[in-house]
Image: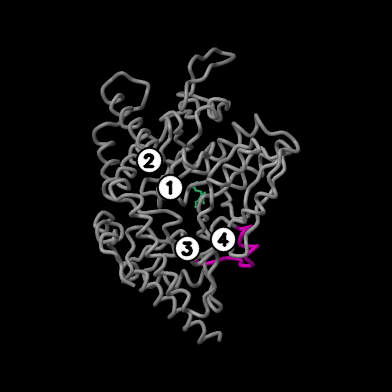
Amino acid sequence: MTFTQERTLATQTRADFPILDQEIHGKPLIYLDNAASSQKPLAVLEALHYYYTHDHANVHRGVHTLSSRATDAYEGARDKVAAFINAASRQEIVYTRNATEAINLVAYAWGNANLKSGDEVILSVMEHHSNLIPWQLLAQRTGAVLKFVQLSETQEFDLEHYKSLLSAKTKLVAIVHVSNTLGCINPVEEIVRLAHQQGARVLIDACQSVPHMSVDVQAIDCDWLVASGHKMCAPTGIGFLYGKLDVLRSMPPFLGGGEMIADVFLDRATYADLPYKFEAGTPAIAEAVALGAAVDYLNSLGMDNIHAYEQELTTHLFQQLKQIPEVQIYGAQSGDRAGLAAFTTGAVHPHDLSTILDQAGIAIRAGHHCTQPLHRILKAQSTARASVYFYNTPEEIDAFILALKEAIEFFGGIFG
Ligand SMILES: Cc1ncc(COP(=O)(O)O)c(C=O)c1O
């Protein structure tokens, strides 16, 4: 397959990722575990270094120069995140540790105050555990009932089934934008529109979409959206919750402590305005600043270019995977989909496969990818998953396919 020259982002960006330039077991590293976490470009590492060597102090609390520089950098990054997902206001961006914490924030702060016994929450069977367990806990606390959208015949989101679950009892819909196992891109605008017709609120888990394509929260019209920095070139320990201003305003605080208050008395307190009401304690300042640098970096490449290049890489990956008779791929195999493939091979257990490929310098993931209920439905205890990012090359896909074929042949020879 020929790759469009201007879309070969790997050529343009490879040198920005020093970690990729190393050998594992004497073979050049091929990193295909991007859905779990992305690597970090120099621009992000330098932003961290610069912040700690020039600007660090605690934010919001001081009038001295370093404190105001740190505050400017921290708040400047918030502006970048807000613009990146087209939030209407910077106050709609709440920093969290990761997407998981952001979902828990909504489940506790909004869920405890708004759900009661018999209310219904719609999720799908493809949710990551992070978008399942917080709602299970909420259901246990309130008596709310969880309903699950099943898979369509093509192993995608079944919109008709979703429509049949919606009713006046639906108070919340929480759905993944891009599945980290099936790779499908769910019709979130339609999902939100239908939920709002019933007066339900909608949370979108955008962990696997925000790093790879342009995401516009106003176009989606969701009430909340969550993402993790570490999957989008930023450090670990930083993520964000987007929430519509009026929805966030209506929510009580989640964690209490410093930074989130306006006035404190011994027996009561009033709370700070948004977004600080939800940012208790000293935040991950350097990580937030580096998230801003990651957003700048992704913007410099162009999210549409990233998506288009990953589409080409994915087509290349699937074309070759489909030619291996032993390989069973899960999820839709064509159309607009994410750059990841979850699969099994008859003879080789996914964990063994991952270990063998590691010997060839190739990093892929094996397991249930935090979607255990989905794996039960797929009748696979675990799958192997290869996932790309814009710095991966077609040649890396070829090397992965070759190593995969060799592993299957080797195990087929032993057990076949
Ligand atoms: C779809 C999806 N949702 C949620 C998460 C949880 O992200 P984190 O562990 O960064 O909170 C992940 C991470 O793999 C994911 O892929």
Alpha carbons under labels 2 and 1: distance apart: 9 Å
User: Would the CB of label 4 be found within 8 Å of ligand 1?
Assistant: no
Mark 3 surroundings: few (<14), some (14-19) or many (≥20) residues within 10 A = few
The residue wearing badge 1 is 210
Mark 4 surroundings: few (<14), some (14-19) or many (≥20) residues within 10 A = many
In the rendered structure, the answer to whether residue 210 lies left or right of residue 268 reads left
Alpha carbons under labels 2 and 3: distance apart: 25 Å
Q: Secondary structure at mark 1?
A: loop
When asked about the image quadrant of residue 371, the answer is: bottom right
Which of label 4 and label 1 is nearer to you? 1
Amino acid under label 3? Gly
The residue wearing badge 4 is 368
In the rendered structure, the answer to whether residue 111 lies left or right of residue 76 reads right
**Mark before the other along the chain sequence, 2 or 3:** 2
Q: Secondary structure at mark 4?
A: loop
Alpha carbons under labels 2 and 4: distance apart: 31 Å
Amino acid under label 4? His
Amino acid under label 1? Val
Which of label 2 and label 4 is nearer to you? 2
Mark 1 surroundings: few (<14), some (14-19) or many (≥20) residues within 10 A = many
Q: Which residues are magenta?
A: 372-384
The residue wearing badge 3 is 335
**Mark before the other along the chain sequence, 1 or 3:** 1
**Mark before the other along the chain sequence, 2 or 4:** 2
Q: Does 174 lie within the magenta span?
A: no
Q: State if disc 1 and disc 4 touch (CB < 8 Å).
A: no
Which of label 1 and label 3 is nearer to you? 3
Foreground residue among 342 and 190: 190
The residue wearing badge 2 is 84
Position of residue 172 relative to residue 381, above or below, is above
Alpha carbons under labels 4 and 1: distance apart: 22 Å
Q: State if disc 1 and disc 2 touch (CB < 8 Å).
A: yes
